[in-house]
Image (cartoon, rainbow, N blue to C red):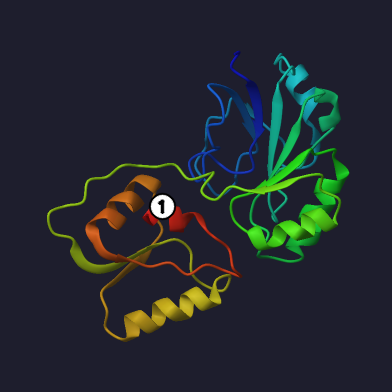
């Protein structure tokens, strides 16, 4: 059986969240974040809606793929168009649909604007019925799809601390209150942002790892800690 040639239109910088590896023969295209260090994509995409098929042809890339996967979330940074021109199955990988303004309306509207065959999410299973109501042909929940496993050996003795890696602040009020309560109780909390490699070492070396999701989201931290 031939290895499928898959195009992944990714919404995020690979230094932050890399695209999942779906095939040995995979091509990734995506926009460059303005708040992250420069990343090397095989092909950088515009940050506004654009013709993905023509963008590939204009840069000398054969647009003949067996599958096209488009990652789209409530920030709408990645919104490729003219997907029907590929003439192959189309998958919408639905990202964060649980925060910011009108996230589900934004995502369902984009889904309806292109002829997707399947909608997949690894985060909000409880939102899949909204995509079905919006006209999705098929939906699926694949938790942990975008998580990269980084094996780290646990030290002989783990540190007596509570490790948290991620964002807090006004966009995560419940999580922020919980962290502040733990710190106010005098518990040894280590909280902040870190790379995937540093995060894996922190989780492996700490007695406890903390997580608080937003609006029922099964966030990547669940799988990363495990």
| Left or right of 219 in this view: 52 | right
Q: Position of residue 121 (x, y in %)?
A: 64, 50
Q: Nearer the viewer, residue 173 or 115?
A: 115
Q: Quadrant of the N terminus?
A: top right
Name which residue lies at 52% across and 67% down: 213
Name which residue lies at 18% across and 60% down: 158
| Left or right of 80 in this view: 188 | left
Q: Residues within 10 Å of mark 1 (few under 14, many from 20)?
A: some
Name which residue lies at 68% across and 35% down: 69
Q: Is residue 109 above or below residue 37?
A: below
Q: Disc 1 on helix, strand or loop?
A: helix
Direction front: furthest residue: 1
Q: Position of residue 48 (x, y in %)?
A: 77, 42
Q: Nearer the viewer, residue 42 or 131?
A: 131
Locate residue 2: give its quadrant.
top right
Locate residue 132: give its quadrant.
bottom right
Q: Quadrant of the C terminus?
A: bottom left
Locate residue 221: give its quadrant.
bottom left
Direction bottom: furthest residue: 185
Q: Is residue 100 above or below residue 20?
A: below
Q: Nearer the viewer, residue 33 or 130?
A: 130
Q: Nearer the viewer, residue 189 or 226?
A: 226
* Residue at image mark 1: 224
Direction left: furthest residue: 156
* Count of picture labels: 1
| Left or right of 6 in this view: 147 | left
Q: Position of residue 204 (x, y in %)?
A: 27, 54
Q: Position of residue 167 (x, y in %)?
A: 48, 64
């Amino acid at each position: 059986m031939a290895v499928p040639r898959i195009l992944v239109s990714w919404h995020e910088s690979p230094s932050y969240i890399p695209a999942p590896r779906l095939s040995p023969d995979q091509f990734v295209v995506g926009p460059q974040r303005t708040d992250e260090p420069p990343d090397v994509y095989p092909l950088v995409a515009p940050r506004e809606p654009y013709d993905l098929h023509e963008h590939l042809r204009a840069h000398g890339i054969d647009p003949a793929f067996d599958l096209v996967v488009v990652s789209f979330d409530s920030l709408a940074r990645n919104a490729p168009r003219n997907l029907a021109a590929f003439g192959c199955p189309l998958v919408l990988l639905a990202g964060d649909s649980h925060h910011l303004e009108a996230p589900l309306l934004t995502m369902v509207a984009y889904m309806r604007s292109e002829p997707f065959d399947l909608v997949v999410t690894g985060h909000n299973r409880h939102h899949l019925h909204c995509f079905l109501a919006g006209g999705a042909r098929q939906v699926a929940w694949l938790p942990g799809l975008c998580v990269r496993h980084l094996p780290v050996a646990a030290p002989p003795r783990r540190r007596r601390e509570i490790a948290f890696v991620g964002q807090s602040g006004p966009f995560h009020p419940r999580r922020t209150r919980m962290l502040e309560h733990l710190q106010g109780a005098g518990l040894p909390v280590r909280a902040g942002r870190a790379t995937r490699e540093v995060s894996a070492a922190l989780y492996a070396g700490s007695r406890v790892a903390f997580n608080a999701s937003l609006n029922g989201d099964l966030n990547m931290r669940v799988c990363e800690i495990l």
